[in-house]
């Protein structure tokens, strides 16, 4: 069984989450392939897809939205899982909901879960305009990624996928 993990990321922290997810899913004996959304030319050969994005101004990144629209008809033929990484506080761990746009896209591609994880942002990596935006929205830089939560979700994805593939389903 082979799963595609694809994420849109501006500053790299969502890619690190995707790597952790890929590694954890692989522990269940599922082959994982991590590819940028714009590099994907076919979904053939993938039994499942995990799609993720960093959140900016309450929206997913354009590369993730474009991926969902481009592959929207083919994606529901296989189990699809979505995650967002965003909040720079502990609100995601407290059962925070992904932004409306992500939930809408998730519905469109038949995602079996649209999970929200805490994000990560260091001021040093930001352009002045992004720093100003952060200040205006009152968020503080820091690393709020919940690695145990990320691995738990990846375990759930792997279990769900294996159950979906099981002959007695
Ligand atoms: C300018 C700016 C706007 C942001 N807007 C949001 C937002 O609306 N909601 C949210 O949950 N996180 C927001 N974040 C936090 C990012 O989603 C978070 O840092 C995420 O981990 C970034 O992912 P990336 O490193 O993969 O690009 C914002 C960050 C910046 C710098």
Image (cartoon, rainbow, N blue to C red):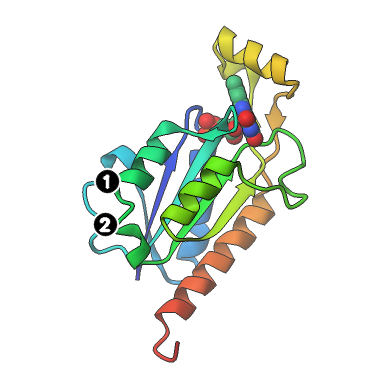
Q: Is mark 2 within 8 Å of ligand 1?
A: no
Q: Quick one: which residue is furthest to the top in this view?
A: 128
Observer-nearest of 17 and 168: 168
The residue lying at 37 percent from left, 46 percent from top is 68
**Which quadrant of the frame does ligand 1 lie within?**
top right
Pointer 1 with pointer 2, Cβ within 8 A? yes
Secondary structure beneath disc 1? loop
The residue lying at 35 percent from left, 38 percent from top is 66
The residue lying at 71 percent from left, 21 percent from top is 137
Q: Can you give x and y, in whole percent of width and height, for residue 15 in the image?
A: 48, 40
Observer-nearest of 81 and 119: 81
Secondary structure beneath disc 2? loop
> In this rendering, is residue 139 above or below 16?
above
Count all numbered tags in the image, as a single digit: 2
Instruction: Give neighbour class at mark 2: few <14, some 14-19, many 20+ (Cα, 10 Å).
Output: some
Q: Can you give x and y, in whole percent of width and height, for residue 153 in the image?
A: 60, 60
Q: Quadrant of residue 55?
A: top right
* Mark pair 1, 2: CA separation: 8 Å
The numbered mark at residue 117 is: none
The numbered mark at residue 43 is: 2
The residue lying at 29 percent from left, 59 percent from top is 74
Q: Is residue 86 visible?
A: yes
Q: Can you give x and y, in whole percent of width and height, for residue 28 in the image?
A: 49, 71
Q: Quadrant of residue 8?
A: top left
Q: Can you give x and y, in whole percent of width and height, for residue 14 in the image?
A: 52, 39
Q: Quick one: which residue is furthest to the bottom in this view?
A: 168
Q: Which residue is label 1 attached to?
A: 40
């Amino acid at each position: 069984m082979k799963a595609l993990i694809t994420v849109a990321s501006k500053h790299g922290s969502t890619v690190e989450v995707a790597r952790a997810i890929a590694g954890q899913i692989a522990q269940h004996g599922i082959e994982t392939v991590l590819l940028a959304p714009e590099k994907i030319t076919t979904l053939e050969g993938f039994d499942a897809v995990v799609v993720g994005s960093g959140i900016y101004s309450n929206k997913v990144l354009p590369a993730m939205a474009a991926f969902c629209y481009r592959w929207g008809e083919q994606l529901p033929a296989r189990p699809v899982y979505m995650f967002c990484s965003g909040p720079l506080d502990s609100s995601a761990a407290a059962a925070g909901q992904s932004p409306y746009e992500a939930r809408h896209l998730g519905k469109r591609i038949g995602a079996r879960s649209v999970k929200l994880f805490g994000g990560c942002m260091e001021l040093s990596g930001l352009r002045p305009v992004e720093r100003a935006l952060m200040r205006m929205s009152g968020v503080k830089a820091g690393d709020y990624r919940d690695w145990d939560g990320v691995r738990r979700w990846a375990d759930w994805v792997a279990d769900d996928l294996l159950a979906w593939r099981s002959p007695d389903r």
